[in-house]
Image (cartoon, rainbow, N blue to C red):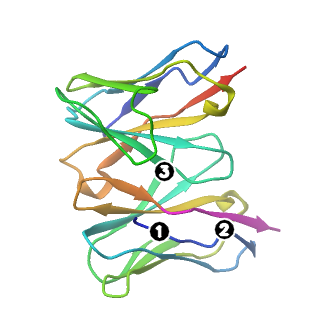
Amino acid sequence: GQNIDQPTEMTATEGAIVQINCTYQTSGFNGLFWYQQHAGEAPTFLSYNVLDGLEEKGRFSSFLSRSKGYSYLLLKELQMKDSASYLCAVHYNTDKLIFGTGTRLQVFP
Amino acid sequence: GAVVSQHPSWVICKSGTSVKIECRSLDFQATTMFWYRQFPKQSLMLMATSNEGSKATYEQGVEKDKFLINHASLTLSTLTVTSAHPEDSSFYICSARDLDGIKDGYTFGSGTRLTVV
């Protein structure tokens, strides 16, 4: 199988920083996506990592370590509207996009 | 950017009936489309890969006779849930690959909420 694991739930305070981790099986790895999803809606693209390192895009950054099968999504200056599910998804060489277990983030005032 | 249109957005059907969900790529051609199912508070689970002009490839544990997939053109894939039962109630999402835009190359439909009563 291609287990892609994330913490189930996280909570944080408005204005804080939160890091959401994702671990995956490295065999056949092509790239890793992070998506945001609000309940009842389609996932929204946040980032794509294919090489090791950190990619920064505004308040959101994503990190990848291919050798360790590890990624994280960093959210800075949290806002209430950031309360959502965050999904890590791995693109394997079969062209499939496999989603992780998902992390529900709740931001409190 | 690439747009995928999915219809209907919600449907209620009686047990034993069949429901068809359509997924269209509006401004690009998609030789491959993907169908996912999502139960409440869970992540997206890949059901099958839909290939234009050939049979779909189903993930382990997904009944191909129950979830019929047809990908007759480069812009349309359909998922038919046959003889639906209440346990089939779920959120179904399709995705298409726009090969010109790898960074956000997987474009998702808006999803279909199926309720079987």
Residue A44's disc number: 3
- Which quadrant does the N terminus of chain B fall into? top left
Q: Is mark 1 in CB contact (under 8 Å) with mark 3?
A: no
Q: Earlier in the sequence, mark 1 or mark 3?
A: 1
Q: Nearer the viewer, residue A87 or A60?
A: A87
Residue drawn at x 24%, y 43% as measured from the top left: B98
Instruction: Estimate the spatial distance between the alpha carbons at disc 2 and disc 3, rounded to whole Å.
Output: 19 Å
Q: Is mark 2 in CB contact (under 8 Å) with mark 1?
A: no
Task: Residue type at mark 2: give it.
Answer: Thr
**Helix, strand or loop: magenta stretch:** strand
Which residue was labeled with disc 1?
Answer: A4
Indicate the secondary structure of the residue bearing disc 3.
strand
Which residue was labeled with disc 2?
Answer: A8
Residue drawn at x 31%, y 87% as measured from the top left: A67
Q: Are marks 1 and 3 on the same chain?
A: yes
Does residue B95 lie above or below A59 as drawn?
Answer: above
Residue B17 in magenta stretch: no
Does residue B85 lie above or below A45 as drawn?
Answer: above
Give the letter of the chain under mark 3: A
Q: Nearer the viewer, residue B93 or B79?
A: B79
Indicate the secondary structure of the residue bearing disc 2.
loop
Q: Please tell me how crowded label 3 is: few (under 14), some (14-19), or many (20+) other residues with Cα within 10 Å.
A: some
Residue drawn at x 28%, y 34% as measured from the top left: B56
Task: Residue type at mark 3: give it.
Answer: Thr
Instruction: Estimate the spatial distance between the alpha carbons at disc 2 and disc 1, rounded to whole Å.
Output: 12 Å
Q: Nearer the viewer, residue B84 or A95?
A: B84
Q: Which residues are magenta?
A: A100-109
